[in-house]
């Protein structure tokens, strides 16, 4: 873990770098091996913030355990509420960088994806993926996009009546993989990974959304956060 932005009087929040393999929040009340608990050891005031989930305190968002990158933690209750409102208004922009395989058949192989209007095409650089989402699979560990092309039964299973948008830029080819940048302002669990898998660009190393993954580690990183005119990046 690394501190990217310290708590200040006018901006009472932390920006932290979370390494891969370390959870964002405690997995149980006595769990201390996570980013939030380690940050709270340095800044005990973080424990005074009451979050949507008691165990998460002022965490504004989470990253999957295998994903490395930037996290925001509010340092007092007033600023926590302010950050939540900014997030709701789409004013906290998160950018992810990934190395992706080109498997145009990926969504069909995984199953239960609706048709994709913006499937990857080598001549195109920019994409905008939009959908609702629903939990999917054993233990609801995965998610699937939901669109108007989905069945009426599936449309009733959406987690929230919110359309989630991922703006994607295909940048370069590295070692037979495509480097991608994806920006979101509102997020659903696994949103970026699932949208990339849907369009035929599953993240290399993604054990959930890459149907023939050949990598040991997932090549997916939370690399930038834009917040109230400030830009934090790694």
Image: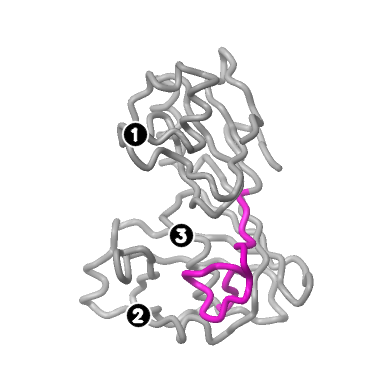
**Does residue 142 lie above or below 8 as drawn?**
below
Task: Residue 4 in the image: state x and y as whole percent.
Answer: 66, 31
Nearer the observer: mark 2 or 1; the answer is 1
Q: Is residue 78 magenta?
A: no
Task: Residue 137 in the image: state x and y as whole percent.
Answer: 32, 71
Going from N to C along the chain, the mark reached first, 2 or 1, is: 1
Mark number, residue 149: 2
State which quadrant residue 78 falls in. top left
Q: Residue at x 39, y 82 (%)?
A: 111
Which residue is labeled 1 in the image? Answer: 55
Going from N to C along the chain, the mark reached first, 2 or 3, is: 2
Say which element carries label 3: loop
Which residue is labeled 3 in the image? Answer: 190
Is residue 4 rendered to the left or right of residue 60?
A: right
Say which element carries label 2: loop
Question: Start and end of the magenta stretch?
Answer: 200-222
Going from N to C along the chain, the mark reached first, 1 or 3, is: 1
**Does residue 140 lie above or below 67 as drawn?**
below
Which quarter of the rendering shows the N terminus? top right
Nearer the observer: mark 1 or 3; the answer is 1
């Amino acid at each position: 873990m690394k501190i990217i932005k310290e708590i200040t009087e006018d901006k009472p929040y932390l920006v932290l770098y979370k390494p891969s393999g370390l959870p964002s929040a405690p997995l149980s009340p006595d769990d201390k091996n996570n980013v939030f608990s380690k940050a709270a050891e340095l800044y005990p005031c973080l424990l005074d913030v009451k979050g949507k989930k008691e165990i998460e305190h002022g965490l504004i968002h989470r990253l999957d355990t295998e994903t490395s990158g930037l996290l925001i933690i509010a340092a007092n209750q007033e600023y926590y509420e302010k950050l939540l409102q900014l997030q709701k208004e789409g004013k906290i922009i998160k950018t992810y960088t990934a190395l992706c395989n080109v498997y145009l058949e990926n969504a069909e192989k995984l199953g239960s994806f609706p048709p994709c209007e913006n499937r990857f095409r080598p001549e195109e650089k920019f994409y905008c993926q939009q959908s609702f989402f629903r939990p999917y699979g054993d233990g609801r560990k995965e998610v699937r996009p939901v669109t108007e092309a989905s069945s009426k039964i599936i449309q009733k299973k959406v987690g929230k009546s919110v359309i989630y948008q991922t703006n994607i830029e295909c940048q370069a080819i590295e070692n037979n993989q495509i480097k991608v940048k994806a920006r979101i302002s509102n997020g659903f669990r696994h949103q970026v990974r699932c949208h990339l898998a849907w369009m035929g660009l599953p993240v290399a190393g993604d054990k959930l959304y890459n149907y023939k993954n050949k990598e040991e580690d997932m090549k997916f990183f939370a690399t930038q956060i834009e917040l109230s005119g400030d830009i934090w990046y790694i």
